[in-house]
Image (cartoon, rainbow, N blue to C red):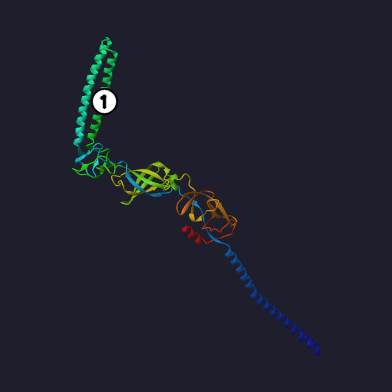
């Protein structure tokens, strides 16, 4: 082999090595380029995503639940006797004796006390004497008138004289009627010296003792109260119902009472009547309930709590009060529509449960309602729903 041929043979493998080296350098350069550019591209994408996420509000959602058909209303109440009366004197005098004390059960007409009033007895005797005088005068006038009528029938006396006798008889009859009326008045006054119970009940106060001076009347500057009586078997319970729930209260509605001295006991009661008008000062409706005294377990004058459970005409949906919005158009809620965007939905409110409200219309049971919607949340905006844990905690807070 010549020298030229050997040189040509040695050049061929040298060119191949150069090519492999170039390829290796290219691969290394490409790898370095990829390693430097790809993380930067990924970082920019992540930064852009975080920027978009930061501009998208995060909200919690709740789903409506069926509202309870009944809502218990608890209100303070005043227990009073079904019949309650202060007993005063109708005549002046001294208390001769009393026969009942506090806590005594009495019947209607039972004698409670007696008043010694001799002036009234004297007036009664005088009235009866005046009545006897008037009766005698009338009898004489009647006899005279009858005689003159007989004489006038035979024209023995003048008609004028007969008419005078008849008129005198009629005047005496009027005087007799007046005397009898006065006698009855004084006799009635004399009967007031005996103080009697006006109805069946319990004596709750006795304010006098034997020998005390009694003045007639019930005005503050007149006679004092002798006894106080209350009917104890049936009781009246008065309660002021707020205007917001007054429509749910009507005669016949069932309720129950709770008393501080009887914890854990429920005393059944029934609403019997309402005032039919709101108190303009408190904006509340006065309601009266009837309750049995349960053998004296409930006493007149006691404080009680009334629990009323009215049935709703129709039950709606239950939502936390924190979902409500009150724009110019009325009560509304913000929901997430099928496209994941915010929609402002106007609703019709029903009962107020405090931390929750009843929705009667304008909202589907499957709606996704946003909790605590901000004032800046507008319809058509995109939002992100928080994690279930956050949603649950927000729902619990609401």
Identify the residue shown where x is 66% and y is 76%: 33
Indicate the secondary structure of the residue bearing disc 1: helix
Q: Would you identify the image quadrant in which residue 170 lies?
A: top left
Image location of residue 336, percent across then percent down: 56, 56
Point out the residue furthest to the bottom here.
3
Label 1 packing within 10 angstroms: few (<14), some (14-19), many (20+): some
Q: Is 187 left or right of 387, judged from the image as shown?
A: left
Nearest to the observer: residue 92 or residue 226 = 92
Question: Which residue is tagged 1?
Answer: 177
Q: Is 115 left or right of 240, judged from the image as shown?
A: left
Nearest to the observer: residue 107 or residue 260 = 107
Q: Is residue 1 visible?
A: no
Point out the residue furthest to the top here.
154
Q: Is 304 left or right of 10, judged from the image as shown?
A: left
Q: Is residue 119 visible?
A: yes
Q: Is 22 left or right of 88, judged from the image as shown?
A: right
Identify the residue shown where x is 27% and y is 24%: 174
Query: Which quarter of the image is occupied by the N terminus?
Result: bottom right
Nearest to the observer: residue 232 or residue 204 = 204
Identify the residue shown where x is 55% and y is 55%: 335
Q: Give the answer, above or below, for where 192 lies relative to 156.
A: below
Q: Give the answer, above or below, for where 59 lies relative to 299.
A: below
Image location of residue 177, percent across then percent down: 26, 25
Identify the residue shown where x is 22% and y is 22%: 137
Image location of residue 364, percent across then percent down: 54, 50
Image location of residue 251, percent across then percent down: 40, 41
Count of all numbered marks drawn on residues in the image: 1
Nearest to the observer: residue 394 or residue 287 = 287
Q: Would you identify the image quadrant in which residue 46 lies?
A: bottom right
């Amino acid at each position: 082999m010549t020298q030229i041929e050997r040189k040509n043979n040695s050049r061929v493998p040298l060119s191949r090595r150069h090519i492999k080296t170039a390829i290796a350098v290219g691969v290394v350069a490409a790898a370095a380029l990829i390693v430097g550019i790809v993380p930067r591209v990924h970082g920019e994408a992540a930064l852009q995503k975080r920027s978009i996420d930061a501009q998208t509000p995060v909200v919690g959602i709740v789903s409506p639940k069926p509202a309870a058909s009944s809502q218990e209303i608890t209100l303070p109440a005043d227990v009073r006797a079904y019949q309650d009366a202060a007993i005063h004197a109708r005549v002046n005098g001294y208390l001769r004796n009393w026969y009942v004390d506090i806590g005594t059960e009495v019947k209607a007409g039972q004698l409670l006390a007696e008043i010694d009033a001799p002036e009234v007895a004297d007036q009664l005797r005088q009235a009866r004497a005046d009545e006897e005088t008037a009766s005698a005068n009338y009898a004489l006038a009647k006899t005279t008138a009858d005689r003159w009528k007989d004489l006038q029938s035979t024209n023995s006396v003048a008609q004028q004289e007969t008419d005078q006798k008849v008129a005198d008889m009629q005047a005496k009859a009027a005087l007799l009627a007046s005397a009898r009326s006065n006698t009855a008045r004084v006799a009635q006054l004399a009967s007031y010296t005996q103080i009697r119970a006006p109805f069946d009940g319990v004596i709750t106060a006795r304010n006098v003792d034997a020998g005390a001076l009694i003045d007639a009347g019930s005005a503050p500057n007149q006679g004092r109260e002798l006894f106080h009586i209350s009917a104890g078997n049936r009781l009246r319970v008065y309660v002021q119902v707020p205007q917001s729930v007054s429509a749910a209260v009507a005669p016949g509605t069932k309720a129950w009472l709770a008393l501080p001295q009887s914890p854990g006991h429920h005393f059944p009661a029934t609403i019997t009547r309402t005032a039919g008008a709101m108190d303009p000062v408190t904006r509340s409706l006065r309601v009266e309930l009837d309750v049995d005294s349960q053998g004296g377990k409930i006493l007149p004058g006691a404080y009680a709590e009334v629990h009323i459970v009215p049935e709703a005409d129709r039950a709606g949906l239950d939502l936390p009060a924190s979902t409500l919005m009150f724009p110019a158009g009325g009560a509304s809620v913000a929901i997430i529509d099928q496209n994941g965007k915010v929609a402002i939905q106007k609703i019709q409110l029903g009962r107020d449960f405090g931390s929750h409200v009843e929705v009667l219309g304008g909202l589907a049971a499957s709606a996704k309602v946003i909790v605590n919607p901000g004032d800046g949340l507008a319809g058509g905006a995109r939002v992100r729903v928080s994690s279930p844990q956050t949603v649950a905690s927000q729902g619990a807070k609401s």
